[in-house]
Amino acid sequence: MWHNFRKGIFEDNPVFILALGLCPTLAVTTSAINGIGMGLATTFVLLCSNILVSSIRHLVPDEVRIPVFIIIIASFVTLVRLIMQAYFPALYDALGIFVSLIVVNCMILGRAEGFAKKHGILDSFIDGLGMGTGFTLALFTIGGVREILGANQLFGMLVVPGFEPANFFILAPGAFLVMGLLMAGFKIMLERKLNK
């Protein structure tokens, strides 16, 4: 059962291995806090939608399952968006349109279709928790590296006195470079771990 949790973080990491959800990954990870915020919002939607899809999987005819899954996901995204707007307005403004675009995040629909509709509630919860944790850790790592290299800060605090940051890493090309290098490093680390 907990194997599915670990897979979401390592072997099937949504960003570093499966390359899912890359649009928000590249767009919002200008800082570590943005990465954590988007990761947690996505994790909440993923958990809730996995649980609900698993709960109703025997009630939904195959012909309408995708529209039903999208309505479920959209409902939880709306809830997240309203909560963020009310209680975390600065983070909501920083993430912008990408909060609403969680609805079309292929990772969430993919887990609903590929896992939750075939498994029980507990397994679907653990799968969603693992994939969400893996997604959040990936966004935090990318955002943290970009923030350190591009602003010499982490969570708004100076990291290395005298270090001259390169604004390039805060821009879109920097996002591609950092993500590509981290993906390569993650895959190398995982292969070494699996070959031991």
Image (tube, rainbow, N blue to C red):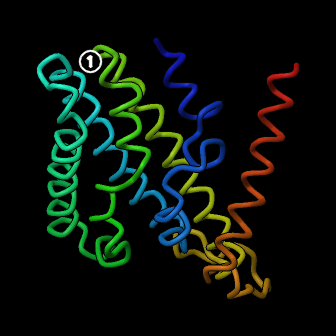
Secondary structure beneath label 1: helix
| In-image side of 131 versus 179 (left or right) | left
Residue 34, given in percent of the width and then of the height, sits at: 45, 67
Q: Quadrant of the C terminus?
A: top right
Total numbered labels: 1
| In-image side of 18 versus 131 (left or right) | right
Residue 87, given in percent of the width and then of the height, sits at: 18, 65
Q: Residue at x 39, y 53 (%)?
A: 105
What amino acid is found at the position of numbered circle 1 in the picture? Ile
Q: Residue at x 33, y 33 (%)?
A: 112
* Residue behind mark 1: 121
Residue 107, given in percent of the width and then of the height, sits at: 44, 45
Vertical arrangement, residue 66 with respect to residue 75, above or below: above
Q: Nearer the viewer, residue 72 or 145?
A: 72
Q: Nearer the viewer, residue 25 or 156?
A: 25
Q: Residue furthest left?
A: 59
Q: Give residue 125's quadrant in the image.
A: top left
Q: Residue at x 27, y 65 (%)?
A: 100
Q: Give residue 98's quadrant in the image.
A: bottom left
| In-image side of 44 versus 182 (left or right) | left
What crowding class fits label 1: few (fewer than 14 Cα within 10 Å), some (14-19), or many (20 or more)? some
